Image (spheres, grey):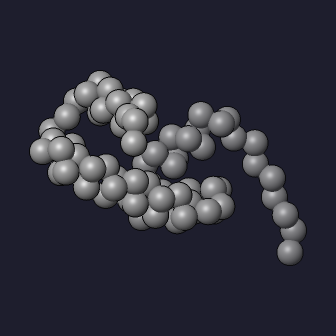
Amino acid sequence: METVTLKVPESQVVDWVRNLPPTTKRAVLLALIPGLDELDALVDYGSERMRELCAQRDIDWDHLTEEERLRLVDDLLHEES
């Protein structure tokens, strides 16, 4: 079987990927980023842990602005135990 090489501008490839259905985009990401599932699991764990920490302080994580979230995380990191 003969191999054919096409020269396509990078922007065209990006446009093609953007137009893919979500499940296919995810398949592309999984092929390009080894360990993506592990990263997703870590992000999910971190999100759940932040919600738990917020609940202990009567804070609704989901209704905080991005700035409020960053300030809260900074406060938690610098909190004395």
Q: Image point 81% across, 53% down: which residue? A: 5
Q: How many marks on residues?
A: 0
User: Which residue of the protein is positioned furthest toward the front in this rendering?
Assistant: 81
Residue 18 horizontal/vertical position (percent)? 46, 45
Residue located farthest toward the bottom when viewing the structure as drawn: 1
* Residue 58 locus on image (x, y percent): 12, 45
Quarter in which the C terminus is drawn = top left
Residue 72, image x, y percentages: 30, 32
Q: Quadrant of residue 49?
A: bottom left
- Asked whether the viewer can see residue 66, the reply is no
> Measured along the vertical axis of the image, is residue 43 above or below residue 57?
below
Using the image as rendered, state which of residue 29 and residue 59 is in the foreground. 59
Residue at position x 76%, y 48% in the image? 6
Residue 40 in the image: x percent, y percent?
47, 59
Measured along the vertical axis of the image, is residue 3 above or below residue 8?
below
**Closest to the observer, 80 or 63:** 80
> The N terminus is located in which quarter?
bottom right
Left or right, 10 with respect to 81, comes to: right
* Up-down relation of residue 7 to residue 31 (above or below): above
At 38% from the left and 34% from the top, the residue drawn is 79
Identify which residue, 5 or 53, lies in the foreground.
53
Residue at x 53%, y 58% (from the top left corner): 39
Would residue 50 appear left or right of 7 to someone viewing this image? left
Q: Quadrant of residue 8?
A: top right
Vertical order, 2 against 67 (above or below): below
For residue 80, say whether it is visible: yes
